[in-house]
Image: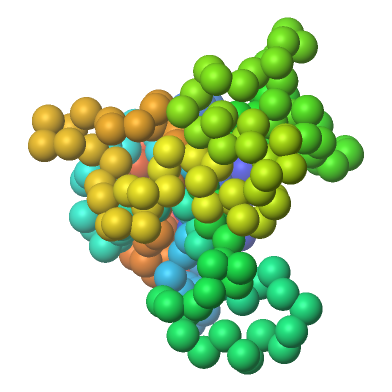
Amino acid sequence: MKNIVVVGGGVIGWFTAAFLKKKHFDLNITLIESPNVPILGVGESTIPQLGELLQALEIDQFTWMEKVHGIFKYSNHFVGWNSDKPKQHVTDHWNAPLYEQQNHPFAFTFRDKAFVKSLYSPISKDDFFYDNDGRYGIDQKSFDYWLELVRQGKYSWWESAQYFSEHYYPSMSNKSPYDWDNELYLGPWNQHAWHIDAERFPIVVRDMVALPLGVNWVEVI
């Protein structure tokens, strides 16, 4: 295989073209798109794995964040998702009762392969409480104390979901993952993600990676 054609631009198209060219520089990569088909320009919520792709493309985090008007995020906060009542009864998302809120951070005490396993079967409580070698994992991280209280039945799962991670306070207090020296406050880099302008993102990947590497760009009206 010497030639690959990517039909359609946008985030997926330009990421695909850029990644293929980055990993297989000898391939002839062509992206075809129409200027008459607009990019789906919505706010885009991402997950930490996006960072792995951007690292592979050697795009500096702070450079692309500025270009896509991005902000950091530690978690997803859901209000009114965990009740049997009609959802319209949650009218004030900022001051909703605690039982109507769920904060899902990107860092849990999962076993390494728990997410892979979850593709085939549900994640069990053991994936929270035990290490990869089968040892009981409580007390190894600060938020394990909350998990122990859940195990003892002193807190329900939804009630403790707010505190599963040490990311809860900075997440709810609009704190950056980095200090003034660009050092991470909590854990490795992949414990945070980003919210970005999806209309700007493909342009960044196109202009910073794909075109400089030699991807052929064809616009068809």
**Residue occupying image coordinates x 50% and y 77%:** 96
**Residue occupying image coordinates x 23% and y 38%:** 178
Using the rendered view, name the quadrant where residue 138 is placed. top right
Looking at this view, name the residue that lies furthest to the right. 121
**Residue occupying image coordinates x 47% and y 64%:** 44
Q: Is residue 56 visible?
A: no
Residue 109 at x, y = what percent?
60, 29
Residue 134 at x, y = what percent?
76, 11
Residue 24 at x, y = what percent?
53, 27
Q: Is residue 68 left or right of residue 89?
A: left
Looking at this view, name the residue that lies furthest to the left. 180
Above-or-below relation of 174 to 118: below
Residue 123 at x, y = what percent?
79, 38
Q: Is residue 123 visible?
A: yes
Q: How many marks?
A: 0
Q: Is residue 118 left or right of residue 160?
A: right
Q: Is residue 8 left or right of residue 202?
A: right
Specify how the rendered protein is coloured: rainbow
Q: Nearer the viewer, residue 148 or 74?
A: 148
Above-or-below relation of 125 to 82: above
Above-or-below relation of 191 to 84: above
Q: Nearer the viewer, residue 59 or 216?
A: 59
Using the rendered view, name the quadrant where residue 179 is placed. top left
Placement of the N terminus among the 4 image quadrants: top right
**Residue occupying image coordinates x 26% and y 62%:** 69
Q: Nearer the viewer, residue 101 or 36?
A: 101
